[in-house]
Image: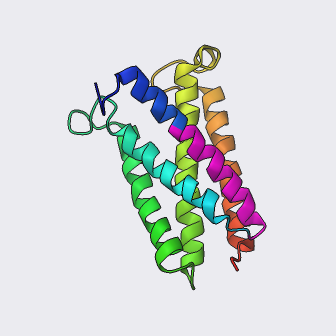
Amino acid sequence: MMLGMSLSTLTVVHVIISLIAIVAGLVVMFGMLGSKLQPGLTAIFLVFTILTSATGFVIPPFLFEKTLPSHMIGILSLVLLAVACIALYVTKLSGPWRWIYVLTALISLYLNVFVLVIQSFLKIPALTALAPGNPPSGPIFAVAQGLVLVFFVVMIIGVWRRFRPA
């Protein structure tokens, strides 16, 4: 039992939180291409992405038992999200904080999608057959992660150039 839930229930809650964060983040990212801040959806993206990282630490194995790459991604994501929240809510995106927000928020979204791709190859039998192993490996997995990386690099550059909040 973790947080009053069975491990399987906690895992399902963690996955749902992650998917909400990713969908909200993608909508926010595309909105930023048109210089739309979308305050409510942005808050949902940031809160649920923070919750994704936080709930990942209470699913065994624990950080103090065995440090996994997912723990390191979670720590990095939390640091990036803290900076994104400061940029958005404290400095109001003034001066260089606009591009700092763009980078930190969208890199944290990328990290969430990066983990989604890994987990998809681990948990979906058809994908596991294409890229077996833990962690997954092989050319198909590399292409999938490469496409995700290229997509986010292109999007971050586009948002960086176009996002001009009111």
Q: Is residue 126 left or right of residue 52?
A: right
Q: Which residue lies furthest to the right in this view?
A: 34
Magenta stretch holds residue 95: no
Q: Nearer the viewer, residue 158 or 90?
A: 90
Viewer-nearest residue: 100 or 88: 88
Instruction: Identify the residue at horizontal 34%, vertical 26% (top origin).
Output: 5
Q: Name the residue at 41% across, 21% down.
A: 8
Nearer to the camera, 57 or 24: 24
Residue 61, position as x, y percentages in the image: 29, 29
Name the residue furthest left: 64
**Residue pictured at 60% horizontal, 67% vertical:** 102
113 over 97 or under it: above or below? above
Protein image colouring: rainbow
- Report the predominant secondary structure element of the magenta stretch: helix
In x, y percent, where is residue 99?
59, 74
Start and end of the magenta stretch?
A: 17-35
Q: Can residue 89 be seen in this view?
A: yes
In the rendered image, residue 57, in percent from the top left (x then y), is placed at 33, 39
Q: Relative to 62, does residue 84 appear above or below in the rendering?
A: below
Along the horizontal axis of the image, is 51 left or right of 62? right
| Image x and y of residue 70, in percent | 40, 39
The quarter of the image holding the N terminus is top left
Question: Is 23 part of what is drawn in magenta?
Answer: yes
Position of 44 with respect to 153 (left or right) is left
